[in-house]
Image (cartoon, rainbow, N blue to C red):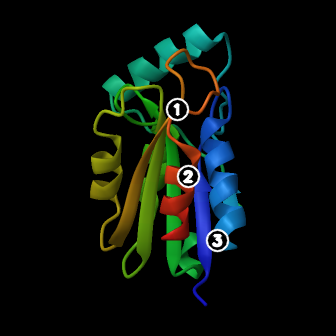
Amino acid sequence: MMKKLVVYYSQSNGNTKRIAEMIAEKIGADITEIDTVVPYTGSYDQIVRQGQEEVNRGFKPQIKEIEKNPGEYEEVIIGTPTWWYTMAPAVLTFLSSADFAGKKVAVFQTHGGWPGHTLKDMKSLCKGADIMSEKAIQFDSTGGNRLETPLDEIENWISGL
């Protein structure tokens, strides 16, 4: 059986974490979170403004060392919330420094109705990987945690991992 790892970054409502935990539980994968050295602080709106500025300039925040080494796994599933039509800056940092050569990789995003080019951007950074799957998962557009993508659609995607 292949060793599988779910790597994710989550902010505010924890929607991406919720999906990552669902994946890890259903496929028997290990799970680890990406976290920034300097945490985002302030109101939701302040974090959104900071995130937009960081995305616009391609900022890669320093991230903490993750608990699991993706190099020890054959399959890696990577999740991000959508920040201004792409991945969160912390995920950009992670993907820019990781080596996926020879690995099977799946990517997923959570979004509030504007998926943008997130999955394309993520896949382009997984150099040498065999991209096996991708999924955009929508939550409500108000920044809340109400799932809009049908649960059975998500579960069907997960069962294919």
- Marking on residue 152: 2
Secondary element at tag 3: helix
Q: Amino acid at mark 1?
A: Glu
Rendered position, 44 above or below 156: above
Please rate how many residues cluster around mark 3, counting C-alpha atoms within 10 Å: few if below 14, some from 14 to 19, many from 20.
some
Q: Which residue is more in the foreground, 24 or 95?
A: 24
Residue 82: image location, x then y, percent? 44, 33
Say which label, 1 or 3, has the lower sequence index. Answer: 3
Give how far across and how far down residue 96 sits, in percent: 39, 54
Real-space CA distance between mark 1 and mark 2, rounded to the nearest whole angstrom: 11 Å
Mark in front: 1 vs 3: 1
Mark 1 sits on what residue?
148
Residue matched to label 3: 27
Residue 117: horizontal and vertical position, in percent? 28, 39
Q: Give the residue type that dot 3 points to.
A: Ile
Residue in the image at 67% along x and 55% along y = 22
Going 62% across and 27% down the picture, which residue do you hit?
146
Residue 28 falls left or right of residue 83: right
User: Would you say residue 89 is visible in this rendering?
Assistant: yes
Q: Is residue 68 visible?
A: no
Name the secondary structure under disc 1. loop
